[in-house]
Amino acid sequence: MATPSIADLLNLKERVAFVTGAAQGIGRAIAERLGEAGAHVAVADTNQTEAAATVAAIRQAGGSAESVLVDITSSAAVQSGIDNVCTSKGRLDILVNNAGIYPMRTFAESDDALWQKTLDVNVMGTMRCCRAAVPHMQKSGGGTIVNLASIAGLKPEYSHLAHYETSKGAVLMMTRSLAWELRASRIRVNAVAPGGVQTPGARQSIEPLLADPKKLMERSREFMSRIALKRMGEPDDVARAVLFLASPMADYITGATLLVDGGYLLS
Ligand SMILES: NC(=O)c1ccc[n+]([C@@H]2O[C@H](COP(=O)([O-])OP(=O)(O)OC[C@H]3O[C@@H](n4cnc5c(N)ncnc54)[C@H](O)[C@@H]3O)[C@@H](O)[C@H]2O)c1
């Protein structure tokens, strides 16, 4: 058998992708890269204004995209969002579970509502999308799922995010569990674990720390000093890793976690 070219391995023409949280930040960059690679991209988000901007950017670059209003905390909304895309496009090949929240609160200040909300979006939301997507992938003979985890799911790095770290640890285990369980359906399941990435959500999450600018500066300096590659991550750094895992480039990879942290966890 002839070895496929790199261009062929990254060509997602005729593929259909569903990306959650694609209205802004990392999800938007992922949607744009998948669109550039030729996939039709369903831009799924609660924020329809920004989702429309993502769709417009993909179309302007010559790609194909649609906006889908989905709150991943609702099983019914996830089911109909994914079913509708599959009905109109006839298939689903790629699911990227990117939507996630990371409200900062110390463990002592956290309450049941904060834990429930974080787990509902980050863990249950990921599970709901997988559950709705898998039968469609099985129908067309396989597919690929990429879950957004975090370095926070591998090592407790922040002292305001136990609820988030717990949720991303669960996402990593779900990735491996599903990779194993879905092997017979030829569905690959992988995760990316970003470090610090400059996004609207990240900027919003540090707002509570703005009250103490000196402490914030100290924390940022300490964070930066630990990044081997000496810069914060950009959404596209993560998008390229997701594109790799979602494409036939990664045909022999399942159950893996790809760190995209500029070497932060080396320290
Ligand atoms: N930014 C970072 O430093 C960083 C680091 C590691 C991991 N991550 C992970 O990457 C993912 C994206 O992060 P980001 O920084 O781009 O976030 P962001 O807040 O900038 O964007 C998140 C998007 O998800 C959408 N969203 C949130 N809740 C939703 C819901 N219930 N249903 C549908 N859409 C919903 C938002 O509307 C938004 O468009 C998250 O899973 C996050 O945990 C981010």
Image (cartoon, rainbow, N blue to C red):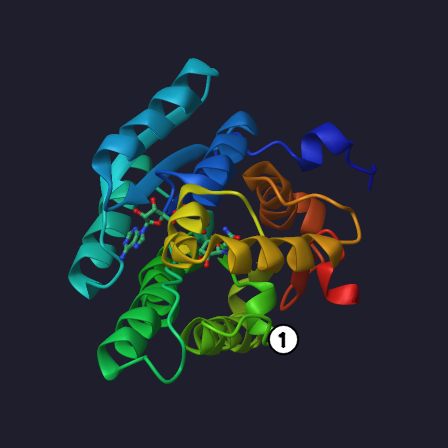
Callout 1: CB less than 8 Å from ligand 1? no
Q: Please state the horizontal and vertical placement of residue 152, each as a whole percent of the image.
A: 56, 69
**On the image, numbered disc 1 is attached to which residue?**
155
- In the picture, residue 136 is in which quadrant? bottom left
Is 180 drawn above or below residue 5 in the view shown?
below
Residue found 60% across the figure and 46% down from its top: 238
Q: Is residue 76 above or below residue 23?
A: below
Is the C terminus in the top left, top right, bottom left or bottom right quadrant?
bottom right
Q: Nearer the viewer, residue 145 or 204?
A: 204
* Most foreground residue, 118 or 65: 118
Q: Along the line of sight, which residue is nearer the eye, 87 or 54?
A: 54
Residue at image position (37%, 85%) is 108
Disc 1 residue type (three-letter) = Lys
Q: Residues within 10 Å of mark 1 (few under 14, many from 20)?
A: few
Residue 92 visible at all: no
Note whether residue 174 is visible.
yes
- The extreme right residue here reads 2
The picture places residue 196, in percent across and down from the top left corner, at: 59, 53
- Quadrant containing the N terminus is top right
> Percent x, y for residue 206?
43, 54
- What residue appears at the point 23 percent right and 63 percent down from the top-left corner? 73
Q: Secondary structure at mark 1?
A: loop
User: Relative to residue 256, is residue 47 drawn left or right?
Assistant: left
* Residue at figure coordinates x 41%, y 42% from the top left: 200
| Rendering coords of residue 103 (x, y %) | 36, 63
Q: Along the line of sight, which residue is nearer the eye, 115 or 95?
A: 115
Tally of numbered discs:
1
Q: Is residue 204 left or right of residue 156?
A: left
